[in-house]
Amino acid sequence: METISVIPTLISVLSVCIASLIYMNSREAVKNTKENLKQSQDKYLYELRLNALKATKEVEMTWQKAINDLYHEKDRIKNIGNNINLEIREMLDDLESGLLKPSLEHIVEMRKKLEEGFDDITEEEGKLIIRKMEIMSVELRHTQEQSIKKYQLLYDKMKDI
């Protein structure tokens, strides 16, 4: 009879041990899941910050290309050699110093601030930066295409004079 009363007690003790093991494993699984989620969020935020920095650098490079295009146009106009080319070159110099270079400097400063505060950029800030840079990049490319056409027309007209 004694063995009969020991068996339910033994089963109860084993059930408690198994339940404790299941609880400990579940706790460990939850802890691991939280760590994995944090690592995943950190990786996402890092990639978002990196993409914001890349987008800013692309806009910076587009500005630099616009300045280079202007420099080459001034050089082409210089070779024409009529009286109008001095006024045109001055106008292009004013465009370069008054609009293009300050805008490039602003973008360079923005990129440097992003690099310095890279770890402090929030998800919302990163998304906003990327969105602004995408819009600016599209506008810049369009403006650059239009400028190249206008430079060519100006050059052709000056050759005819």
Image: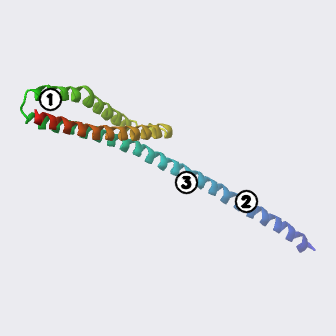
Q: Is residue 85 left or right of residue 15?
A: left
Residue type at mark 1 is Arg
Residue visible at 14% across and 25% down? 87
- Please tell me which residue lies in front, 51 or 87: 87
Give percent across and percent down for residue 151.
20, 37
**x and y percentages locating residue 93 in the rendered image:** 18, 28
Residue 20: give its label. 2
Quickly name the residue at label 3. 36
Residue 140 rendering spot, x and y as whole percentages: 33, 38
Q: Give the CA separation, mark 3 to mark 2.
A: 24 Å
* Residue at the disc numbered 1: 89
CB of mark 3 within 8 Å of CB of mark 2? Answer: no
What quarter of the picture does the N terminus occupy?
bottom right
Rendered location of residue 122, percent (x, y):
48, 38
The answer to whether marks 1 and 3 mark residues whose Cβ atoms lie closer than 8 Å is no
- Towards the viewer: 110 or 113: 110
Depth-wise, is mark 1 or mark 3 nearer the camera?
1
- Give the position of the C terminus as an image quadrant: top left
Instruction: Give the residue at x 43% y 43%.
Output: 49
Q: Please tell me in which quadrant of the rendered image residue 138 appears.
A: top left
Q: Which one is in front, 81 or 102?
A: 81
Decide which of 149, 140 is in the foreground and name it.
149
